[in-house]
Image (spheres, helix red, strand yellow):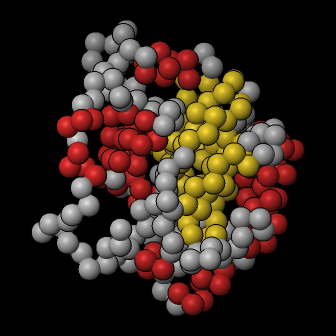
Amino acid sequence: MRELRVALLQIAPGENLLMSREKGIQACREAKKLGADIALFPEMFSNGYRIYDRPVAVWSQEAISAEDPFVLSFGKLAQELGMAIGITLLESCATGPRNTLVLWDRWGRRVLTYAKVHTCDFDVERALTPGEDFYVTELDTAIGPVKVGAMICFDREFPESARILMLKGAEIVLVPNACPMEINRLAQLRGRAYENMIGIATCNYPMGVPDCNGHSNAFDGMAYWPELSESRDTCILEAGEEAGVYIAAFDMDRLREYRASEVHGNAFRHPKKYKLLVEERIQEPFIRKEYRG
């Protein structure tokens, strides 16, 4: 069995960028001691997702470049530890700040940069610039190459996000998060993993961070095993509310065998019949004045 071990760094941010950096480094070192191949941060860790109940003009000034020493320090740390690190940030951008994940591989190479596509435009996230696309990278790990993609928080609520990542070859999807993990959001993640036959690892902030409650989680997407008479629970990890580093272990050999034989994912789709899915027209009752295409 070849396991891919993803560490979910369910930790609160520091009071400022420097303190968050130090807390993040400490958590990454703990993840390495636990045998992690990838360490994943919660959403927008550079400023702790502190964008509510504050003027946009104030928190938008906290945006940093993807070349900022804060971001680069985790690339250096990834190389030092021999462990991939997915660091999240409020990224400065010419069109306005973005909600971004940068993934460094175990050699300290930047292999994926993803900005949240589905910003919560009904709320304060309307001030963010949405990302343009979903991306998948072949991540070099100790167990060999693994195809990894990413989506962020609200992206989870759109089946298209995980579907596109699956169609682009993703085996594992990393999901930074900053909201309460309750039964329906967990159900969405469970569904995305099941219908696409992908592993999903979600990292949330612990209880005590506003509007968050821990419960970082992972689903391996494999509903059926030959030796079982009925379907199985695809949840391989659900953390509690407390801060900590939690390890989700994905059996990549078994996942690949499952993807090569089961009926979900792209095995029996009829894409020629799905033209309505890319229709841009929106009709009642779904018209929202905040929507931007």
Percent position (x, y) of residue 116? 50, 61
| Residue placed furthest toward the right | 80
Image quadrant of residue 266?
Answer: top left
| Residue placed furthest toward the left | 284
- Asked if residue 72 lies left or right of residue 169, the reply is right
- Asked if residue 77 lies left or right of residue 86, the reply is right
Image quadrant of residue 101?
Answer: bottom right
Percent position (x, y) of residue 248? 57, 36
Image quadrant of residue 242?
Answer: bottom right
Please report the residue visible at 20 percent of the width from the left and 72 percent of the height from the top.
Answer: 287
Name the image quarter holding the C terminus: bottom left
- Asked if residue 116 lies left or right of residue 31, the reply is left
Name the image quarter holding the N terminus: top right
Please report the residue visible at 28 percent of the width from the left and 52 percent of the height from the top.
Answer: 278
Tell which of 256 and 251 is nearer to you.
Answer: 256
Percent position (x, y) of residue 59? 59, 83
Vertical arrangement, residue 108 with respect to residue 10, above or below: above
Q: Is residue 13 shown to the viewer in this render?
A: no
Tell which of 281 and 230 is nearer to you.
Answer: 281
Percent position (x, y) of residue 214? 50, 57
Tell which of 38 and 229 is nearer to you.
Answer: 38
Vertical arrangement, residue 234 with respect to residue 69, above or below: above
Please report the residue visible at 40 percent of the width from the left and 52 percent of the height from the top.
Answer: 156
Tell how many labels: 0
Q: Is residue 156 shown to the viewer in this render?
A: yes
